Image (tube, rainbow, N blue to C red):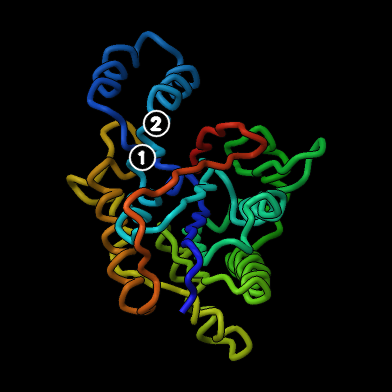
Amino acid sequence: MNTKPKLLISLGCSFTAGLGCYSDESIEWYNSNKDKINQPELTLTLLYKNRKRFKEEGWPFLLSKKLKFNKLINMGIGGSSTSAQLKRFFENYHVFELEKYDTTIIWLLTNSVRFSKYINGQVEDISINGKNESIANSYHRLATDIDYTLEQIFTIRCMIEFCKSHNINLYFDSWHTKTKNDISNTCKKDDSLKYILNYYLDIGGIDSIHHTDGYISRICEHPNQEGYKEMARLLYEKLITIDSHILGNSDNTENTIVRARGDYIPINYM
């Protein structure tokens, strides 16, 4: 058994960053100001008001505490693509001191139509509603559903090879039903890709939480505090059934957030 302290690295978009678990005071403030303040300013103010809650009430920290891990590094960034998440991981992992930890990576994949490019020296996420809309539209005119899926599968394969070489436990799933199904079906049909499913949690219901009464934020189409608790519960129950050695023994989890060069990136709705 590995006796090193346990580290969880969480990758994903706003559903990993914790967007949606707003305080009651923030919801009240939002309702009283939504007709007075323009939407971008309103959204950014809410994000900054609730950064501590996102950090402490999202599924990554809740799951880390359930697993009794020593440390969490949450790399969830709102509006980010799968490819950008991998790029930012590779840009930062050298400072994580991975050799000191028994490391698990959980990657909650986002919508497969998002992608990324390096622009002006940094990773930029590309979406049809983002600042690089023209680039997105040019690509989407050429791409098909299978292309989006294959892009994500390629990205997952890169991470699998990295984790193999660094003795890291890797698991992935998705909050996005179509992405979840497309990756699963594509890998099942192609013998050369079936091994990817060994890393696929395939948790039933994790993709429907943000459509379920009682689990939805009253401000955005994201889980609220109860929704993230349910996500953490589903992840925990799945993990302890497939990995008998995953539980740690720490009563205090160090909670760290890594953004793109320290920036908090708001969600770009898709």
Residue 195 appears in which quarter of the rendering?
bottom right
For disc 1, the marked residue is 56
Task: Name the residue at 59% across, 61% down.
Answer: 100
Residue displayed at 67% across by 61% down: 143
Disc 2 residue type (three-letter): Lys
Q: Position of residue 62 (x, y in %)?
A: 32, 50
**Above or below: residue 196 compared with residue 129:** below
Work out whether 163 lies above or below 215: below
Mark 2, residue position:
52
Q: Secondary structure at mark 1?
A: helix
Query: What's the mark number on residue 135?
Result: none
Q: Is residue 236 left or right of residue 102?
A: left
Q: Residue 194: image x %, image y %? A: 55, 86
Residue with the most extreme right position: 120
Name the amino acid type tagged 1. Answer: Glu
Within 10 Å of disc 2 (Cα), the crowding (few <14, some 14-19, many 20+) is few
Q: Residue furthest front?
A: 3
How many numbered circles does the render carry? Answer: 2
Residue closer to the observer: 156 or 66: 66
Residue 230 is at least partly visible in this image: yes
